[in-house]
Amino acid sequence: MFDTTLILLGAGSSSRFKLPVKKQWLYSGDVPLWLQVADNFKTLDIFEQIIIVSSKSDIEFMQNFTTDYRFIVGGDTRQASLSNALAFVDSSYVMVSDIARCCIPKDMILRLLDAKEDASCIVPTLKATDTLYMNDMPIDRESIKVIQTPQLSVTSLLKKALESDEVFTDDSSAIASLGEKIKFVDGDTKAHKLTTIEDLSKLDCIKAPKDINLVGFGIDTHPFEDNKDMYLCGVKINSDFGFKAHSDGDVAIHALIDALLGACGMEDIGELYPDDDNSYAGIDSKILLRDSVAKIRAFGFDIINIDMTIVAQTPRLKEYKPLMRDTISKILDIKPQFVNIKATTSEKLGFIGRKEGVTVHAVANVKYFNHKEIAQ
């Protein structure tokens, strides 16, 4: 019965979407779009396996959500991504769709499966409804077919077709290059592809994100090191010593990154920027924070506010706090009043009291990016 594998392609950069968030990471309720699409297919209970193709960084985060699907790193093109996935397909048939084609009706999928023995590739199509021209000459619109996905192919033939150096825009054109039969079935206007911001208003299966705050906590400690510049919250501190660390040692930014990542469920700073990677040796921690913020936004989150406590017997930090707040607020792209920075001592207790180092505690609040506000 289960002789078909589903491949969901989502390794693109969403460059045409023109928003900081990748379209596959828009949240519908509290579920990212890629997972909603995969789960909708899974409920049909007709696939031998479901493969999700995405970028390496996306997959590392996707795996925190589910173990139900196989994840494959995509290539530079749709065709390369599909070839990567097909290497893990042994079923007789393979259905290929795009995560961005997110509102596919069940009966459209069943039409493809019902016709699978009628041709080497089954393709859903729409009729052209507008007058069409090519090179200043009208075209008979009755002869035009608007191609959609998913498409259902004989696995062995699709693999064979993609061995060619020729570039194909979809599976049907690859199968057709072998001289194989293509069958067209009715598509559905509901299976509209999410490409631009304007498409959001056409896709009623994408619900508003859940209106909740997600909280993360971060803590970091660094000992002092003589003859090194000291940075806290991206601000240079007048001191004869800095922090012992692989990077510039900005313990405040490191705690903040962990708090932000924790709120989003994105592991920790050591996972993203390991201290055994020489590319991060001595790096300005503001660069790491900017990169973390870009990742957080790409994965569908907005930052609400942060609160930090710097525990230091030395140096005194009161005069630096306004510049610290300004520096952090600009990197996070939130108003300064939503960046709270406190400094305290340890009352001369412990290693901090002995002036051997500094500890910073940070709390961050984030929420899901509200795409419904953009679509209105």
Image: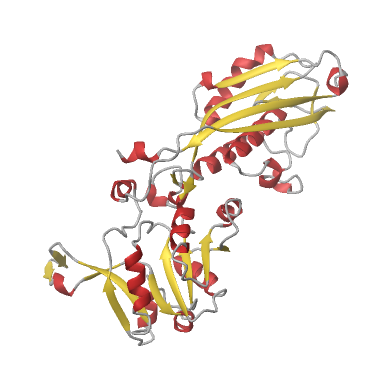
Residue occupying image coordinates x 44% and y 43% = 29
Q: Position of residue 34 (x, y in %)?
A: 47, 54
Residue 35 or residue 9, whichever sits in front? 35
Q: Is residue 158 left or right of residue 255?
A: left
Quadrant containing the C terminus is top left
Residue 279 vs 157, above or below: the answer is above
Q: How many numbered marks does the figure carry?
A: 0
- Identify whether 235 is placed above or below 316: below
Q: Residue furthest bottom?
A: 179
Q: How is the image coloured?
A: secondary structure
**Quarter-wise, where is residue 350 in the image?**
top right
Residue at the image point whose x is 50% and y is 76% from the top = 2
* Residue 3 position in % (x across, y down): 49, 78
Q: Is residue 249 left or right of residue 356?
A: left
Which quadrant of the structure image shows residue 245? top right
**Left or right placement of residue 177 versus residue 7 in this view:** left
Q: Is residue 233 visible?
A: yes
Q: Could you tell me which residue is drawn at 60 percent across and 54 percent down?
A: 63
| Residue at the image position 81 percent from the left and 33 percent from the top | 244
Q: Is residue 200 left or right of residue 53?
A: left
40 up-or-down from 17: above or below: below
Residue 13 shows in this picture: no
- The x and y percentages for residue 255 are 69, 31
